[in-house]
Image (tube, rainbow, N blue to C red):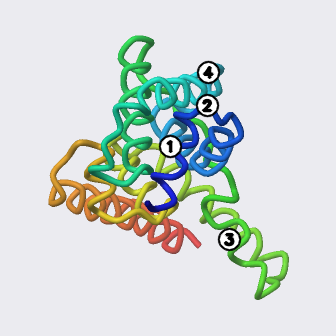
Amino acid sequence: MNSEQLLVEQILAGDKAAFERLVSQYQRLVSHIVARIVGSEGDFEDICQDVFFKVYKSLKSFQFECKLSSWIGRIAHNTSLNHVARKRPASFSDLSEEEYGADSYADSQPGPIEMAEQADVANRLKAEIRCLPQAYRTALTLYHLEEMSYIEISEIMSLPINTVKSHIFRARRMLKDKLLAVYRREDLCA
Protein backbone atom coordinates (compact mmCIF):
# COMPACT_ATOMS: atom_id res chain seq x y z
CA MET A 1 0.00 0.00 0.00
CA ASN A 2 1.51 3.33 -1.04
CA SER A 3 1.34 6.56 0.96
CA GLU A 4 -1.66 7.92 -0.98
CA GLN A 5 -3.64 4.74 -0.36
CA LEU A 6 -2.70 4.80 3.32
CA LEU A 7 -3.78 8.44 3.64
CA VAL A 8 -7.12 7.71 1.96
CA GLU A 9 -7.68 4.66 4.17
CA GLN A 10 -6.98 6.74 7.28
CA ILE A 11 -9.41 9.46 6.18
CA LEU A 12 -12.12 6.93 5.36
CA ALA A 13 -11.58 5.41 8.81
CA GLY A 14 -12.45 8.79 10.35
CA ASP A 15 -8.95 10.12 11.07
CA LYS A 16 -9.42 13.92 11.05
CA ALA A 17 -5.67 14.53 11.27
CA ALA A 18 -5.20 12.53 8.06
CA PHE A 19 -7.69 14.77 6.24
CA GLU A 20 -5.86 17.83 7.59
CA ARG A 21 -2.64 16.37 6.12
CA LEU A 22 -4.39 15.91 2.77
CA VAL A 23 -5.60 19.51 2.81
CA SER A 24 -2.16 20.76 3.77
CA GLN A 25 -0.49 18.68 1.07
CA TYR A 26 -2.82 19.75 -1.76
CA GLN A 27 -3.79 23.26 -0.66
CA ARG A 28 -1.26 24.96 -2.94
CA LEU A 29 -2.39 22.95 -5.98
CA VAL A 30 -6.04 23.79 -5.35
CA SER A 31 -5.25 27.46 -4.72
CA HIS A 32 -3.30 27.76 -7.98
CA ILE A 33 -6.03 26.17 -10.04
CA VAL A 34 -8.83 28.19 -8.45
CA ALA A 35 -6.85 31.44 -8.69
CA ARG A 36 -6.12 30.96 -12.38
CA ILE A 37 -9.75 30.36 -13.20
CA VAL A 38 -11.74 32.56 -10.82
CA GLY A 39 -9.10 34.99 -9.59
CA SER A 40 -8.88 36.07 -5.98
CA GLU A 41 -12.35 37.52 -5.75
CA GLY A 42 -14.31 37.25 -2.54
CA ASP A 43 -15.41 33.70 -3.36
CA PHE A 44 -11.85 32.37 -3.67
CA GLU A 45 -11.63 30.85 -0.17
CA ASP A 46 -15.17 29.50 -0.37
CA ILE A 47 -14.39 27.75 -3.64
CA CYS A 48 -11.20 26.22 -2.21
CA GLN A 49 -13.18 24.97 0.80
CA ASP A 50 -15.86 23.64 -1.53
CA VAL A 51 -13.20 21.70 -3.44
CA PHE A 52 -11.97 20.00 -0.27
CA PHE A 53 -15.54 19.33 0.84
CA LYS A 54 -16.17 17.59 -2.50
CA VAL A 55 -12.90 15.68 -2.13
CA TYR A 56 -13.96 14.48 1.32
CA LYS A 57 -17.45 13.48 0.18
CA SER A 58 -16.14 11.66 -2.92
CA LEU A 59 -13.04 10.05 -1.44
CA LYS A 60 -14.75 6.69 -0.97
CA SER A 61 -15.28 6.49 -4.75
CA PHE A 62 -11.64 7.27 -5.61
CA GLN A 63 -10.24 4.18 -7.35
CA PHE A 64 -6.51 5.11 -7.65
CA GLU A 65 -6.73 4.99 -11.45
CA CYS A 66 -4.72 8.21 -11.45
CA LYS A 67 -2.64 10.09 -8.90
CA LEU A 68 -4.51 11.63 -6.00
CA SER A 69 -3.13 15.04 -6.99
CA SER A 70 -4.62 14.67 -10.49
CA TRP A 71 -8.00 13.69 -9.09
CA ILE A 72 -8.04 16.60 -6.63
CA GLY A 73 -6.84 18.93 -9.37
CA ARG A 74 -9.68 17.81 -11.64
CA ILE A 75 -12.20 18.51 -8.87
CA ALA A 76 -10.68 21.99 -8.35
CA HIS A 77 -10.72 22.66 -12.11
CA ASN A 78 -14.33 21.57 -12.58
CA THR A 79 -15.55 23.37 -9.44
CA SER A 80 -13.86 26.57 -10.60
CA LEU A 81 -15.27 26.33 -14.11
CA ASN A 82 -18.75 25.72 -12.70
CA HIS A 83 -18.38 28.78 -10.46
CA VAL A 84 -17.35 30.98 -13.39
CA ALA A 85 -20.22 29.68 -15.50
CA ARG A 86 -22.70 30.49 -12.72
CA LYS A 87 -21.32 33.89 -11.78
CA ARG A 88 -19.92 35.92 -14.66
CA PRO A 89 -16.88 36.12 -16.92
CA ALA A 90 -13.78 35.63 -14.80
CA SER A 91 -11.93 38.56 -13.31
CA PHE A 92 -8.31 37.65 -12.80
CA SER A 93 -6.22 39.15 -10.06
CA ASP A 94 -2.55 39.85 -9.88
CA LEU A 95 -0.33 36.85 -9.58
CA SER A 96 1.72 36.71 -6.45
CA GLU A 97 5.35 37.75 -6.61
CA GLU A 98 6.31 34.42 -5.10
CA GLU A 99 4.94 32.60 -8.15
CA TYR A 100 6.47 34.62 -10.94
CA GLY A 101 9.99 35.54 -10.23
CA ALA A 102 10.22 38.24 -7.59
CA ASP A 103 12.68 36.17 -5.56
CA SER A 104 14.51 34.66 -8.52
CA TYR A 105 16.89 37.63 -8.62
CA ALA A 106 17.92 37.57 -4.96
CA ASP A 107 21.20 35.74 -5.57
CA SER A 108 22.69 38.36 -7.92
CA GLN A 109 21.73 41.36 -5.73
CA PRO A 110 21.09 43.82 -8.56
CA GLY A 111 21.34 47.57 -8.20
CA PRO A 112 18.34 49.92 -8.15
CA ILE A 113 18.15 50.29 -11.95
CA GLU A 114 18.32 46.54 -12.53
CA MET A 115 15.73 45.99 -9.79
CA ALA A 116 13.36 48.45 -11.44
CA GLU A 117 13.85 46.80 -14.84
CA GLN A 118 13.28 43.34 -13.38
CA ALA A 119 10.15 44.50 -11.57
CA ASP A 120 8.87 45.98 -14.84
CA VAL A 121 9.46 42.71 -16.70
CA ALA A 122 7.79 40.69 -13.91
CA ASN A 123 4.78 43.02 -13.87
CA ARG A 124 4.44 42.88 -17.66
CA LEU A 125 4.72 39.10 -17.58
CA LYS A 126 1.99 38.87 -14.92
CA ALA A 127 -0.25 41.17 -16.96
CA GLU A 128 0.29 39.16 -20.12
CA ILE A 129 -0.36 35.87 -18.34
CA ARG A 130 -3.66 37.29 -17.05
CA CYS A 131 -4.60 38.06 -20.68
CA LEU A 132 -4.03 34.50 -21.89
CA PRO A 133 -7.08 32.36 -22.59
CA GLN A 134 -8.15 30.50 -19.44
CA ALA A 135 -7.15 27.05 -20.73
CA TYR A 136 -3.67 28.26 -21.74
CA ARG A 137 -3.19 30.04 -18.40
CA THR A 138 -4.26 26.96 -16.43
CA ALA A 139 -2.06 24.55 -18.38
CA LEU A 140 0.94 26.89 -18.13
CA THR A 141 0.45 27.33 -14.38
CA LEU A 142 0.13 23.62 -13.69
CA TYR A 143 3.19 22.84 -15.79
CA HIS A 144 5.54 25.57 -14.57
CA LEU A 145 4.36 26.35 -11.04
CA GLU A 146 3.05 22.98 -9.92
CA GLU A 147 5.64 21.13 -12.01
CA MET A 148 3.04 18.62 -13.15
CA SER A 149 3.53 16.28 -16.08
CA TYR A 150 1.54 16.53 -19.28
CA ILE A 151 -0.33 13.39 -18.23
CA GLU A 152 -1.37 14.89 -14.89
CA ILE A 153 -2.47 18.13 -16.53
CA SER A 154 -4.39 16.12 -19.11
CA GLU A 155 -6.23 14.30 -16.33
CA ILE A 156 -7.00 17.51 -14.42
CA MET A 157 -8.22 19.47 -17.42
CA SER A 158 -9.90 16.47 -19.11
CA LEU A 159 -8.01 17.16 -22.31
CA PRO A 160 -5.88 14.96 -24.57
CA ILE A 161 -2.14 15.16 -23.84
CA ASN A 162 -1.40 16.70 -27.24
CA THR A 163 -3.93 19.45 -26.54
CA VAL A 164 -2.20 20.19 -23.22
CA LYS A 165 1.18 20.35 -24.99
CA SER A 166 -0.33 22.62 -27.61
CA HIS A 167 -1.85 24.93 -24.96
CA ILE A 168 1.50 25.26 -23.18
CA PHE A 169 3.40 25.82 -26.44
CA ARG A 170 0.90 28.44 -27.64
CA ALA A 171 0.86 30.19 -24.26
CA ARG A 172 4.65 30.47 -24.27
CA ARG A 173 4.65 31.72 -27.86
CA MET A 174 1.95 34.29 -27.11
CA LEU A 175 3.89 35.55 -24.08
CA LYS A 176 7.14 35.72 -26.03
CA ASP A 177 5.54 37.60 -28.94
CA LYS A 178 3.79 40.10 -26.68
CA LEU A 179 6.85 40.78 -24.53
CA LEU A 180 9.16 41.10 -27.54
CA ALA A 181 6.74 43.55 -29.15
CA VAL A 182 6.61 45.69 -26.00
CA TYR A 183 10.35 45.75 -25.44
CA ARG A 184 11.24 46.32 -29.10
CA ARG A 185 8.85 49.29 -29.12
CA GLU A 186 10.47 50.66 -25.95
CA ASP A 187 13.96 50.19 -27.43
CA LEU A 188 12.93 52.18 -30.49
CA CYS A 189 11.63 55.00 -28.29
CA ALA A 190 14.71 55.11 -26.06
Mark 2 or mark 3: which comes first in sequence? 2
SS at badge 1: helix
**Residue 34 shown left or right of residue 84 in the figure:** right
- Which disc, if any, is residue 118? 3
Q: Are marks 4 and 1 in contact (CB under 8 Å)?
A: no
Quote the CA–CA distance across marks 3 and 4: 34 Å
Q: Quadrant of residue 89?
A: top left
Quote the CA–CA distance across marks 4 and 2: 23 Å
SS at badge 2: loop
Q: Amino acid at mark 2?
A: Gly
Residue at the far top: name it: 86
- The local crowd at label 2, few if under 14, some if 14 to 19, many if 20 or more residues have their Cα within 10 Å, is few
Residue 16, image x and y in percent? 68, 34
Mark 3 or mark 4: which comes first in sequence? 4
Quote the CA–CA distance across marks 1 and 3: 47 Å
Q: Nearer the viewer, residue 60 or 90?
A: 60
Q: Is residue 84 above or below residue 93?
A: above
Q: Which residue is mark 4?
A: 46
- Which disc, if any, is residue 34? none
Quarter of the image where the N terminus is located: bottom left
Mark 1 or mark 3: which comes first in sequence? 1
Q: Which residue is mark 2?
A: 14
